[in-house]
């Protein structure tokens, strides 16, 4: 791997420790919690909060667990991360759910992001040590019905961020691994089936406020960076294309927004304060200068479609938009899926609008077993 790229990645990780960060409002820690783990949803423009009909509902909307069958499902997703940089970064997500009589569906997950090998040098460039950076999270989720059409859900995860070995001196501060916990609160509505032009149809809507919790502290000083608390809301519409139901199409649309803030001193606001104050303009550092991001540009939009033939073969496509001042992720997504007996496989591909975007050519592959 190119050492210059590795140095860049390491500097990005270590930038959290810099005193200059105190002037930045709106920065969040552990952004790996925002990586969409499900290849199926990733092929639909990351629009899934109102679908959430498999084990990956743990990420999108844990309330969706309440509407799922009484089965056990296990899935794993793998992706080489930032492939255009020719790095050794990779992302893995293991998720499962099972039905327990008298309780319902309970899910669990483990998320792991490998940030590769880093090199620490002294002021003269002499190598001092090599170390590996990584981040992981694991937790449980649960969804339950409150009526036949409405469900609530919640989730809990433990978060561990190991960017540099504990004890390293960074800018006069002693670095350490960061830890925190995150809570999800979610709801979903799913209509009864109805007819449109003599075809079965169904409408659903959902919302999920994820990663609610205390900020992460990486040094021996009382400076925390907030978790990437994310509000997601969306709808989905599914319709049979024939009377026999062999051909089905789903349209979905998600709106999402980061609900985290730092105060003027660079410390993470508490959850309630951030939820209130995150509805105004905030300032972020885009790598070169500070820019103000108005509320209208803070929303991320995902639009997707999925076609199934006989519930065995699927093709998917979507579009994801994020304003240039707010991260500038704009890409088309494509995907496919196959189901046979208890086995399933999903594939997704990102085609970025800007050719040199770090996410260009990202491929996700998910394999699942449905018992």
Image (tube, rainbow, N blue to C red):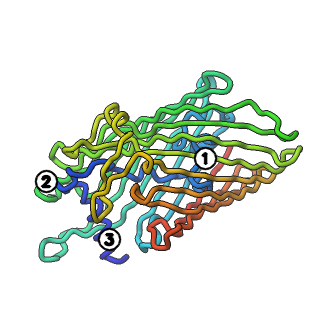
Q: Mark 3 = which residue? A: 6
The residue that appears at 28% across and 46% down in the rendered structure is 225
- What secondary structure is found at the residue carrying circle 1? strand
Q: Mark 1 = which residue? A: 253
Q: Position of residue 118 (x, y in %)?
A: 29, 67
Give the crowd class for mark 2: few <14, some 14-19, many >=20 residues within 10 Å.
Answer: some
Which image quadrant is residue 201 in? top right
Which quadrant of the figure contains the N terminus?
bottom left
Mark linked to residue 351: none
- Nearest the camera: 6 or 270? 270
Q: Position of residue 161 (x, y in %)?
A: 32, 51
The residue that appears at 29% across and 62% down in the rendered structure is 12
- What secondary structure is found at the residue carrying circle 2? strand
The residue that appears at 35% across and 50% down in the rendered structure is 30
CA separation in Å, label 3 and label 2: 22 Å
Q: Mark 2 = which residue? A: 173
Which circle, 1 or 2, is nearer the viewer? 1
**Of label 1 and label 3, which has the lower sequence position?**
3
- Give the total number of marks visible in the rendering: 3
1 and 2 marks in contact (CB < 8 Å): no
CA separation in Å, label 1 and label 3: 36 Å
């Amino acid at each position: 791997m190119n050492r210059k790229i590795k140095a860049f990645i390491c500097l990005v990780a270590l930038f959290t420790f810099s005193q200059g960060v105190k002037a930045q409002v709106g920065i969040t820690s552990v952004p790996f919690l925002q990586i969409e783990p499900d290849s199926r949803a990733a092929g639909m423009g990351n629009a899934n909060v109102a679908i959430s009909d498999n084990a990956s509902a743990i990420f999108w909307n844990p309330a969706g667990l309440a509407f799922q069958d009484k089965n056990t499902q296990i899935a794993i997703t793998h992706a080489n991360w930032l492939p255009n940089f020719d790095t050794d970064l990779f992302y893995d997500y293991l998720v499962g759910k099972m039905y327990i009589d008298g309780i319902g569906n309970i899910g669990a997950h483990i998320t792991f992001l490998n940030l590769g090998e880093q090199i620490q040098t002294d002021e003269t460039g002499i190598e001092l040590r090599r170390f590996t950076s990584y981040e992981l999270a694991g937790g449980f989720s649960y969804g339950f019905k409150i009526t036949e059409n409405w469900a609530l859900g919640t989730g809990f995860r433990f978060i561990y961020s190991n960017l540099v070995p504990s004890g390293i001196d960074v800018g006069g501060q002693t670095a350490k691994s960061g830890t925190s916990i995150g809570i999800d609160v979610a709801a979903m509505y799913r209509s009864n089936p109805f007819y449109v032009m003599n075809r079965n149809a169904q409408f659903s809507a959902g919302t999920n406020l994820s990663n609610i919790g205390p900020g992460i502290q990486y040094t021996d000083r009382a400076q925390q960076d907030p978790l990437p608390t994310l509000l997601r809301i969306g709808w989905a519409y599914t319709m049979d294309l024939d009377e026999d139901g062999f051909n089905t199409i789903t349209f979905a649309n998600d709106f999402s927004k980061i609900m985290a803030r730092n105060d003027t001193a660079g410390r993470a606001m508490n959850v309630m304060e951030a939820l209130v104050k995150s509805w105004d303009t905030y300032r972020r550092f885009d790598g070169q200068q500070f820019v103000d991001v108005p509320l209208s540009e803070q929303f991320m939009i995902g639009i997707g479609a999925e076609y199934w033939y006989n519930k065995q073969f699927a093709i998917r496509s979507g579009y994801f938009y994020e304003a240039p001042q707010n991260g500038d992720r704009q890409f088309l997504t494509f995907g496919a899926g196959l189901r046979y007996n208890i086995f399933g496989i999903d594939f997704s591909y990102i085609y970025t609008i800007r050719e040199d975007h770090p996410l260009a050519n990202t491929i996700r592959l998910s394999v699942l077993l449905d018992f």
